[in-house]
Amino acid sequence: MSRWAGPSRALVVVAAAAGLVLTAGALPHTIELRATAAVTPAEAAVVPVRQSALVCPGPETEGVAGVPAVTGGTTSVLATTAAGAALGGIGTSTEPGRLTLTAQSTGSAPAEASARGATLSASLAGPTLAEVRAVGSLAAGVAAVQTWLRRDSDDRGLVATACPTPGAEAWLLAGGGDPTRRERLLVANAGANPVTVDVEVFGGAGRIATVGGTHVVVPPHGRVGLLVDALAPGEPTPAVHVTATGGLVVAVLEDSWIEGAVGRGRDDVGPAAGPSTEAVIPVALSGHSRLRVLVPGADEAVVQTRVLTSGAAQALPADGVVRVPGGTVRDIDLSGLPAGAYAVQVRADRPLVASVLTERRPAGDGPSDLAWLAAPAPIPVLGGSPIPAGTNAALVLAGTGTDWSAVVYLVAPDGTATASSVSGPADSVVALDATGAASLWVRPATGTVRGSVTLELTDPGGTLVSVVPVLASATSTTDLPVRELRR
C-alpha cells in the first residue's frame, strides 16, 4: 500500500528523462515515497514492504436490494502471515510487526497478532466486510481467505474466496441462465472515500444492454450488492467487468444454483488475471466441468485449449480449437476428462479472460456442490493461503514455458513448517495433499508457477467443494525518492 511521508504539498518525482509527475490518485499501491533533499533517479531502491492490506468481501447474500439473505450459514475469515521458514532469504522490515483483522461496521475490536505465522479468525454477519492489515516485520507474506458453510437444505454448500488487495478493475466469470440460479455481485470498499463503480455484463451474444444499476457508488468502509440475473435476465454464460473510479475495490461474484428441487451448490469466483493471450487454471476436476472464456476486445479470437498433467499435455475430448467473436463469452465442456489434477491452458491470438467450473455430483440425482476458479496470475516470489480446519485440502501447482521448480511449505497448527521441493517439465502439474495444515506457502525457484487449493468436506448429503487461488503475497516495494516542489 502507498505510504506518504513528509509534507502534504505537491511532490515531484525525479524520474529518468521523462519528467513524470505522479499524484496521489495515480500512484501505484506498491510504491512508497519518501521526502528528501537533492535526489537522483539512481536513489530509487527495492526495500522490504512495510505495510500490506487485504479485503474480504463479507457475507455474499447480505445487502442485495430486494433479495432476502440466505440464513443458516456461517461466514468466517482466516488471516495469517508466512512462517519464518517460508521467508528464508526474503528481507523484512525492522519495524515492530502487527497483524490485524477488522470486521467493518460491526463495532467489534480487531483481532491482533504480533508473532509471525500466527492465524487470526473472525465471524462475519450482516452486510459487512473485513480488512486484514499487516505492518512492520509482519507486512511481508500475508494471506487471508473467507468461507461460508451450510450443510443442510437446498442452500447447502461450501463457499471460499481468497481475500485480495483492492484494485481498480475486476473480471468475474461465473453463473448460468437456469430459472433457479442466481449470481450476486458484491463490491466492497475499505477506503475512507466513496468509490464509483461501473458494471458491464457480457454474454454469448456480446455485451448486454443491462436493465439498470450498472453505475453505482460504494460508500466508505461499505459494500454494494447487485443481482446479475436482474441486470441480464436468463443469460446462460454471464461474465462481469467491474471498473472503479476514485478509489480501489474488491469484487466477487457468487453463483448459487437450485435445479428444480435439488441443490446444485454455490461458490464465489474472484477476479481473473487481466486480459492476456494465455490463461492457465490449475484445478482438480471431477465429473461435470467446463471452461468459460471471454474475449473482451472487438476482434474475433482463435482459442486453443488443452490440459496439462503430471506427464504430457492432453488434447480436449472436443472443442480444443474454437473461434470466439470479440466481446462474447464461450463455454467449453471439460466433462469428458477423467477425474484428476490438471491445469487448463488456454492460448489465443487475442487477449482473453477465463475461469473453470467443476462440480461434485453423486450418482443418481442427489444434491451436489460446485466450485469456480478464475485464472490466477503467476506467483513471482511468494504466495500462500490459510486452510480452513476440517477440510480436505489439495494443492495443485502448474509450471509453464520451461522446466520449473518450487518449494512448498505446509504449516501445522502449532506453527511447525515442513518444506517439500517440487518440480516438473515445461507445461506440467504437481498435486500435493495439504490436509491438516493451517496454511501453505509456495516459493517458486525456476519457471512460471501458478497454484490453487481445492477444499472439500465429506458430508452425508454429498461432498462439498470450493477452490481458491494461491495469490501472490507482497514482499518488497519500490522506495522512490522525491523532492518537495517549492512555491
Image (tube, grey):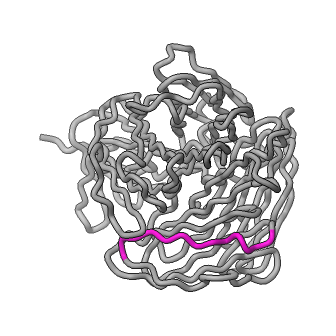
Q: Is residue 320 above or below residue 46?
A: below
Query: How many circles with numbers are drawn on the protein?
Result: 0
- Position of the C terminus, as image quadrant, is top left
Q: Which residue is drawn at 37% across and 50% down?
A: 168
The spot of residue 224 in percent (x, y) is: 39, 35
Q: Residue at x 79, y 60 (%)?
A: 407
Q: Which residue is drawn at 41% across and 42% down?
A: 227
Residue 332 in magenta?
yes
Q: Which of 386 and 325 is in front in this view?
A: 325
Q: Among all residues in the image, which is located at the extreme front? A: 260
| 77 relative position to 395: left or right | left
Q: Among all residues in the image, which is located at the extreme left? A: 487
Residue 273 seen in render: yes
Q: What stretch is highlighted in magenta?
A: 326-338
| 165 relative position to 6: left or right | right
Figure quadrant of residue 134: top right
Q: Residue at x 87, y 39 (%)?
A: 416
The spot of residue 309 in percent (x, y) is: 77, 75
Residue 349 in magenta?
no
Figure quadrant of residue 147: top right
| 480 relative position to 16: left or right | right
